Amino acid sequence: MKKLILGTRGSALALAQTEIVKAGLIAAHPDLQVEHRVIQTTGDLRLDVKLNEPGSLDKGLFTKELEEELLKQNIHAAVHSLKDLPTTLPDGLVISTVLPRAETADILIGKSPLGLHGIPPGGIIATSSERRKRHLQWLRPDLQIIAIRGNVPTRLRKLTEAEEWGGIILAQAGLERLGYDVASGHIEAENITFFATSIEEMLPAPGQGAIALETRANDTETHAILSAIHHAETYARITAERTLLKRMDGGCHMPLGVRTVIEGDSLTLEALFFDSDPEPRKGFASGSVSEPECLAEEVYRILHAK
């Protein structure tokens, strides 16, 4: 194979992530020609859909059209933000490759240097994530949480226009891939400087911060090429996280936060699950990095034993 075609959404973040994939492939295979093809998804076109409604992302709001192009063999691989991928893939498709994971933290882009606890009682926070909403209601039940849609630049613009908002929450990985200097503690948008603070108490979504490549299961040639950029540790972590999510019969709307850590041959999985009770169910377990599915099963039993 001399040319490999990647399918991607057309947002600035999706294109930035595709460039990361392309750079890695070209570094590993200097003679390989790597192209990308922009494919619009339902999620890009239907901004009226509420992401926290059951069934939206589970049905592949941001992935279905990419997968159709894969099955038609119009592309060799689809580039995804892993947290957007449903836990059950169409027949014949697999996650064959994940890149080294970026930071998984949730970042408050706000108007107070004191972060989440600096927002006054009754303050407004905007987020499209049910997980973030429920976590915020647990940490700060006095706040007002409202929904927001759009890409990162659009959400930042909305923050500048809404004087009554205290802030919005975005993933650190996405911000940094778009060139924002999160480490400085400030974000510039529309000539306004906002404060960027990590919400340490908030566990990220399963797969957050990871870039995944979805391919046809029988495409061994593409798998061989992509293996050069595959990161085994990230794969073990996201396997534990996604196995737990699938075991709970959940999708991207599920208010489940997870954190995985690898130390030597040990993998730990921590989880917070919000159901009807404002107080979350908590689960934690450690196990072998070679058995992430078993670890997920153990945390699942802990969560459902409460």
Image (cartoon, helix red, strand yellow):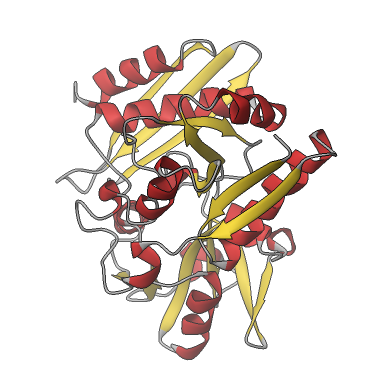
Which image quadrant for residue 147?
bottom left
Front in this rendered view, residue 185 or 174: 174
Where is residue 239? Give x, y as percent. 45, 25
Visible residue check, residue 282: no
Q: Give the answer, above or below, for where 137 lies relative to 257.
A: below
Image quadrant containing the C terminus: top left
Where is residue 226? Give x, y as percent. 65, 31
- In the image, taking residue 96 as reference, residue 250 lies left or right, namely left
Q: Give the answer, above or below, for where 83 lies relative to 195.
A: above
Q: Give the answer, above or below, for where 177 lies relative to 260.
A: below
Where is residue 37? Give x, y as percent. 57, 58
> What residue appears at the point 48 percent right and 75 percent down from the top-left corner?
155
> What residue appears at the point 20 percent right and 25 percent down from the top-left corner?
304
Visible residue check, residue 179: yes
Where is residue 100? Give x, y as percent. 66, 36
- In the image, taking residue 276 as reference, residue 141 lies left or right, namely right
- In the image, taking residue 268 as reference, residue 137 lies left or right, namely left
> What residue appears at the point 26 percent right and 68 percent down from the top-left corner?
49
Which image quadrant for residue 26?
top right
